[in-house]
Amino acid sequence: MAKFELKLPKMGESVAEATITSWLKEVGDTIEADEAVLEIATDKVDSEVPSEVDGVLVEKLFNADDVVQVGQTIAIIETDGDNNGEVEEKKVEEKEESQTDVQPPKEAAEITQSVTAAKETTEPITSSGERFYSPLVRNIAKQEGISQSELDSIDGTGKDGRVTKNDILGYVESRGNEKPQESISPAVPAQKTHIQQPVKDKNSEKPTVAPKSSGEDEIIEMSRMGKLISKHMVDSVQTSAHVQSFIEADVTNIWNWRNKHKESFKKREGENLTFTPIFMEAVAKAIRDFPMINISVQGDTVIKKKHINLGMAAALGDGNLIVPVIRDADQLNLLGMAKKVNDLAKRARENKLSPDDIQGGTYTVTNVGTFGSIMGTPIINQPQVAILALGAIRKVPAVIETPEGDFIGIRYKMFLSHSYDHRVVNGALGGQFVKAVKDYLEAWDVNREI
């Protein structure tokens, strides 16, 4: 029988680790090639890890909520074969290394003595009672000299109160920043107080008071993605100087054109023709006119992006948002844009986006009109410098100018809300850009074919 090492695969640029959310297979289960073995989550997207071979799962090297580095072995699968594969090769290599590294008697004695002394002064880290510690947490504790009693005292934020990588690293950091406590004079006894002590907010230097809850309140823990989104939004507000420009666009021609073509498009392409690809096309054209919107900031320098990669904020079933990216959006015709928008939206709803699908965006568009809002003030998706919110399309009375004079008519209109980073985008550029988007929408050709 051969043994195969299932490793955490590479999941795109800048993704170096992932958290195991759940195991889909247990030790002893039979696994087929390409069958999912476990589910993982990164700071970008959730996905499954499939097996590369047929076999039986004989060992799980990590547990749920453990953080695993890309390339690490996460499970051992036993397969039919005449050799022991990678596992046996590693054992042979380790055996050869141990044979070549034999120390002279005197040096070996000194090493043995030092190891014995270390064992006497350092207690081993083990899982105690109902508290389980992952191999990663135990290794960090060992490297940082954290004792068993210290580890047991750390509050865990993982499932069932488990100590996660972030928990122990936060403890190490706070332990390094602790100042020696001043001794209290015996002549001055400590005063008892019933004042609620402030709790340090991780996202702010100002202490905040922990909220109270009555017995009737429901305590809901934020999801992993919710925590990531929360941190991303707070970091963005603390990084960029947000400012907004608003403009109203008359999209009557687009409304009527879509109503005319949506049924034939559905029959021909098997997909819906929405407003989103039309708006994305207008945004891509405006970015070509104003390329300094398509930038990012790095220290005191500005990086001007060569490609126009539009992020498209999409709502998930659990209420969270994800931003898949339409790459080189300015190179797509309207049909290509519609296909891409529908594909990304469908895979986002089904949680089938890959990490590469949500990376590399240079400008983001979010449709707040989907939820009935007429406008919004969106937060910039870092490291970008601007984001456009599309309001709901409304049928409103409007002044219509004609050569024969002005009159009141019914038009379809919407608000465009443009948030931008005032550190690098001034009011003139921010306003001119959103005005260009409006002009492209209002100049829509009602005779256009798709």
Image (tube, rainbow, N blue to C red):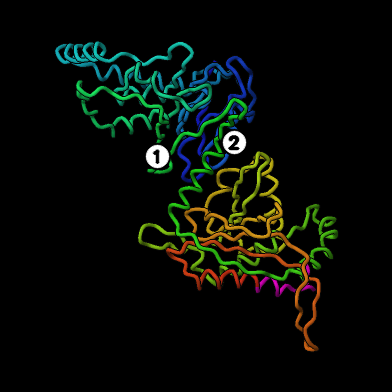
Which quadrant does the N terminus fall into?
top right
Q: What whole-number distance in Å separates the C-alpha atoms at marks 2 and 1?
A: 37 Å
* Residue at image coords 71%, 59%: 392
State which region is magenta.
439-450
Q: Please provide percent x and percent y for residue 63.
A: 51, 22
Going by the numbered disc 1, the residue's amino acid type is Pro
The image shows residue 243, relative to residue 399, as above or below, that is above
At numbered mark 2, what does the secondary structure look like: helix, strand or loop?
strand
Going by the numbered disc 2, the residue's amino acid type is Ser
Q: How many marks?
A: 2
> Circle 1 sits on which residue?
207
* Residue at image coords 58%, 37%: 46
Left or right: 378, with 141 as reference point: right
Q: Please provide percent x and percent y for residue 399.
A: 75, 77
> Circle 2 sits on which residue?
47
- Which one is nearer the viewer's eye here, 310 or 3? 310
